[in-house]
Amino acid sequence: MNYTDQFTDILYEQLKQQVTKSQISSMIEQPKYAHMGDIAFPCFELAKIYRQSPQQIALELANNMQSLSLFEKVEAINGYVNVFLNKVNISSQVLEEIISQQANYGNVELSGQEVITIDFSSPNIAKPFSMGHLRSTVIGNSLALIAEKCGYKPVRINHLGDWGTQFGKLITAYHLWGDEQLVRKNPIKELFTLYIRFHEEAEKNEELNEQGRQWFKKLEDGDEEALQLWKWFRDESIKEFSKIYELLHVPFDSYHGEAFYNDKMEKVVELLTEQNLLQESEGAQVVPLDGQLPPCLIKKKDGTTLYATRDIAAAIYRQQTYQVAKSIYVVGNEQTLHFQQLFNVIEKMGYEWHEGLTHVPFGMILKDGKKMSTRKGKVVLLEDVLHDAIELATNNIQDKNPSLAFKEEVARQVGVGAVIFHDLKNYRLNDIEFSLEEMLKFEGETGPYVQYTHARASSILHKAAYHDNDATLTCVDELSWSIIKSLMEFPHVIQQAFDRNDPSKIAKYVLQLSKAFNKYYGAVRILKNDNQQQVRLKLVQAVQIVLNEGLHLLGIEAPSEM
Ligand code: ARG
């Protein structure tokens, strides 16, 4: 617990619980000048409640707190309680806590293990893995790790886009212009080329669209040939996506995509019919929704079902399979309306668990201020981007540390870490500008900077052949204190990141801790052989542990040397 929380608890006790903790914590102030202490508590509002003068209240509170080990001195001045913290006690406490708990520092223990499903990444078969899917992948992965840290069991679901009219088009195109060998060699690129060609030619030749519709109808009716091709496209695409997931070290518990719900759709339509929720509209079946929301399209004129229908089936299936406490969908903000409609339909169906459904939207990745497009053949292949990042990282390492062991592995960790960090340091709803050079800088607000700081701390510990000891702290200087304050904040930051589905809280936090540590490193001779050396090393170890865990929660590895 950090000292502000502890101070809040103490005041809460003292005030005989007549004011709430959150009222107290909103009253607590940071004094402007050091001579006024480290925290201050103004008693003016309390004066009205207790019908006493502010100074009288301050005096009484200060008297009662004098002897607590958290404080060095407590004064009552002009209606304020000014508190001078006992930095030595607090620091020792924090360091002990981190060093004894190691990677578990900041863990939340819950009584049961509740499930949170996280629907993320979810690329479309036979199409390139887009920048949007990259964002979903890194944000979703981090949210899963954060949920785990907060005591939940995350279930990672890749809701593949593996069904829909586009497969009719693709099969048509493959029949007309496809080459098996080429597809085998380079599936996604080749299939995508076919798909683009289909659209170009269909503009001139309407007949093609009709053929596409027919092939999709065959596919839905279980035609052998159509199914075989579909399965082949799907398998090859997953193989390619898996290469990306391996590079990123992102695991999934389920690859149930849209096609998985084919045999669960009728049931959805049945349920909606039973509950009188369906209405006909221009030959199609829709559910009219509340407020300003346009109706949710369930079944097209030709009887085919839709993206939304599949999502209804998926939500129900997940609830039944995992007894979900919370369901998160990490999908770009252009689908906000879709999720509003989905959640509203679920609510109308009378499912109480609709309250746990959460869309976690995010903005776009821009290149020179414009959306990075995968349409019209201008494909930026994500795998290429990651390989470029790894190559740049290799060059950096070659310059800085040519004799490094396991260079290749470290270059992967740094290259990939740079891409992930660049994404997660921004609040997810902001659009972000894509720049490999920016991401890979060892200075500034980058992944490599944090990784480098972590490696620096590790190497100091290594050099000193540091091991646990019971050296005790006797004084705390300003630079160490700013590190300690930051270390103490970690559990609170994790909680915030969890509550708001916002990994950028953690990214910003590791940057701040890195800065505090590097400032310290620049000013203090850590390895100087005096009686505080072991204490300084403890501080270094605590920083190493927390940076490692912070990076881990972002899905970034932390090499001990780079
Ligand atoms: N495949 C979709 C797309 O690329 C994303 C799917 C998101 N998940 C969901 N349950 N709708 O746009």
Image: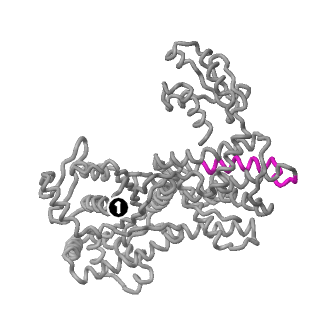
Please name the predominant secondary structure of the magenta segment in the image: helix
Disc 1 on helix, strand or loop?
helix
Q: Position of residue 342 (x, y in %)?
A: 28, 53
Residue at horizontal 40 percent and vertical 78 percent from the top? 236
| Any part of residue 203 in sight | no
- In this view, 74 is above or below 235: above
Q: Amino acid at mark 1?
A: Tyr
| Any part of residue 261 in sight | yes
Residue at horizontal 66 percent and vertical 22 percent from the top? 63
Residue 188: image quadrant is: bottom left
Quick check: 44 left or right of 168? Answer: right
Q: Position of residue 25 (x, y in %)?
A: 54, 31
Quadrant of the drawing holding the C terminus? bottom right
Quadrant of the displayed image that contains ligand 1: bottom left
Residue 312: image quadrant is: bottom left
Membership of 510 in magenta stretch? yes
Q: Position of residue 60 (x, y in %)?
A: 62, 20
Report the span colored magenta. 509-529
Q: Position of residue 90 (x, y in %)?
A: 69, 41
Membership of 226 in magenta stretch? no
Q: In the rendered image, which residue does mark 1 sit on? A: 322
